[in-house]
Image (cartoon, rainbow, N blue to C red):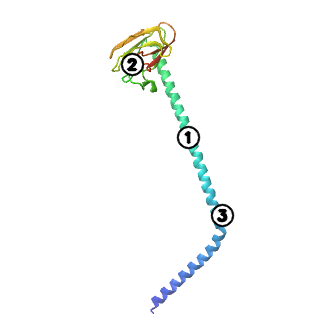
């Protein structure tokens, strides 16, 4: 054997000896720490699960609060817009395309806008932008017309207007398409 081979064998034996001593030393260390490590791992998993549950609840609450705030902001904006434009001597209400088909009432857009606030003496002009004839009749579908105003048939692209001379609240609907209803508040 050459001296190189002997040196390689000696180095290999030394490496194996060192590895065995490290293994036996760490084995004796691990035997005391394994239960503690397992317990810590369980505690970390429980804490992680608790944090996830808490954060899910917090996200849900924030989401609900945000939706409510957005709804209230939209409603406030609509009222502010109504009040800002209520001083006009006349207001336009569209009978939008699609009003003749049930469903517009689900999103409250059978008349656009569906409700108005105006001052005494103001006039509202209803324009039929749908592909079917409509009416604008004061009253409601349950009690029927109350005789304050009635447009008769409003054909496509035609208008009907009414001047509100008395303070009060006025509901109206379409006699042909009873799901279409709106309201006017006169101050």
Looking at the picture, how far across and down is residue 122, in whole percent? Answer: 45, 10
| Front tag of 2 and 3 | 2
Mark with earlier residue (2, 3) = 3
The residue to which callout 1 is attached is 60
Residue appearing at x 62%, y 58% in the figure: 42
Q: Quadrant of residue 29?
A: bottom right
Mark with earlier residue (3, 1) = 3
Q: Quadrant of residue 102?
A: top left
* Inter-mark Cα distance, 2 to 3: 74 Å
Q: Does 4 sit above or below residue 104?
A: below
Residues marked 2 and 3 touching at CB (< 8 Å)? no
At mark 2, the secondary structure is strand
* Inter-mark Cα distance, 3 to 1: 36 Å
The residue to which callout 3 is attached is 36
* Inter-mark Cα distance, 1 to 2: 38 Å
Q: Does 18 sit above or below residue 164?
A: below
CA neighbours of label 3 inside 10 A, class few (<14), some (14 to 19), many (20+): few
The residue to which callout 2 is attached is 94
């Amino acid at each position: 054997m050459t001296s190189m081979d002997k040196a390689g064998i000696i180095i290999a034996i030394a490496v194996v000896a060192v590895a065995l001593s490290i293994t036996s030393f760490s084995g004796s260390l691990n035997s005391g720490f394994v239960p503690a490590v397992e317990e810590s791992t369980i505690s970390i998993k429980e804490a992680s699960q608790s944090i996830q549950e808490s954060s899910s609840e917090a996200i849900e609450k924030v989401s609900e609060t945000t939706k409510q705030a957005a709804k209230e902001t939209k409603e406030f904006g609509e009222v502010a817009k109504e009040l800002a434009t209520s001083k006009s001597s006349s207001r336009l209400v569209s009978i939008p395309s699609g009003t003749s088909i049930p469903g517009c009432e689900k999103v409250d857009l059978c008349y656009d806008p569906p409700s108005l606030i105006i001052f005494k003496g103001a006039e509202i002009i209803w324009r039929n932008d749908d592909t079917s004839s409509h009416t604008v009749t004061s009253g409601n579908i349950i009690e029927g017309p109350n005789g304050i105003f009635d447009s008769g048939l409003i054909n496509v692209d035609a208008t009907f207007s009414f001047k509100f001379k008395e303070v009060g609240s006025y509901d109206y609907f379409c006699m042909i398409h009873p799901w279409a209803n709106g309201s006017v508040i006169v101050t």
